Image (cartoon, coloured by chain):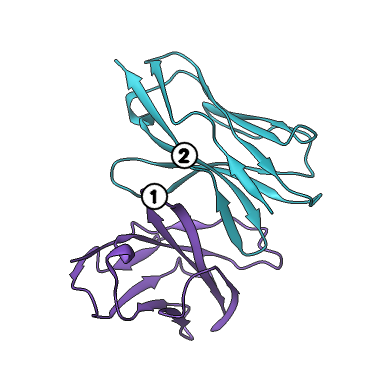
Amino acid sequence: AQTVTQSQPEMSVQEAETVTLSCTYDTSESDYYLFWYKQPPSRQMILVIRQEAYKQQNATENRFSVNFQKAAKSFSLKISDSQLGDAAMYFCAYSRGYQLIWGAGTKLIIKP
Amino acid sequence: KAGVTQTPRYLIKTRGQQVTLSCSPISGHRSVSWYQQTPGQGLQFLFEYFSETQRNKGNFPGRFSGRQFSNSRSEMNVSTLELGDSALYLCASSLGLVGGTDTQYFGPGTRLTVL
């Protein structure tokens, strides 16, 4: 069965510093898609970044980048120059057919 | 382009009642998915609709049902509400590409409280 594990329930980082959120997943498929979403206190789920498993190049979106290790089934999110607005729950998700399988989330706290 | 909209944003119901939630996808998106989010179970997939047909269903009892209209708007219905149905219900829309390879964009959610 496909599962997604986020081992860090909570992380904190000083404003302007860099933080990495971890995610591992389990699948027997060779082609799939991985996502990071953030959910701020407003509860709106917002796409942060997407990675296609067939692409070796790690995805990047401005201050957000991933370290995708397919063999290790690892998909970590790096946030550079952390800002107060980055405070949120971050969810890692795996796309299985027409549904997303979710991790439990990591609460990111930004210290001013 | 307008985002995904969900109505109502908040609902309070009592046990045994039924409830209908509505979701309007992004213009041009033909797939709508529904998720339940609770503190205990996290995010769980309910079902997905594409062109008025349910393509995929999660592991929820038959009290949870949905439908999609010709304009891609979707509704989900929960009958005989239980206390455990209290949750944030999220709707997501996407183009609906074969194999689910596209990105899902989420609405603001409907917060359902069952008393």
Give me the chain letter of mark 2. Answer: A
Give the crowd class for mark 2: few <14, some 14-19, many >=20 residues within 10 Å.
many
The kind of residue tagged 2 is Gly
- From the viewer's perspective, tell me whether residue A87 is left or right of residue B30: left
- From the viewer's perspective, tell me whether residue A20 is left or right of residue A67: left
- Expressed as whole percent of the image width and height from the top left, the position of residue B48 reads 54, 71
Give me the chain letter of mark 1. Answer: B
Q: CA distance from mark 2 to mark 1?
A: 12 Å
Q: Residue at x 46, y 39 (%)?
A: A105
- Name the mark on residue A105: 2
Q: Where does label 1 land, which residue?
A: B40
Residue B32 in view in this figure: no
Q: Residue at x 53, y 29 (%)?
A: A62
Please tell me if label 2 and label 1 are on a single chain. no
How many numbered tags mark residues here? Answer: 2
Query: What is the quadrant of residue B83 in the picture?
Result: bottom left
Residue B80 in view in this figure: yes
Give the crowd class for mark 1: few <14, some 14-19, many >=20 residues within 10 Å.
few
- From the viewer's perspective, tell me whether residue B32 is left or right of residue A13: right
- Name the mark on residue B24: none
- Element under label 2? loop
Compared with B91, A74 (above or below) is above
Query: What is the quadrant of residue B106 in the picture?
Result: bottom left
Q: Which chain is purple?
A: B
- Expressed as whole percent of the image width and height from the top left, the position of residue A99 reads 59, 61
- Expressed as whole percent of the image width and height from the top left, the position of residue B113 reads 23, 63
Quarter of the image with the N terminus of chain B is: bottom left
Observer-nearest of B1 and B66:
B66
- Element under label 1? loop
Q: Residue at x 67, y 63 (%)?
A: A97
Quarter of the image with the C terminus of chain B is: bottom left
Q: Which chain is cyan?
A: A
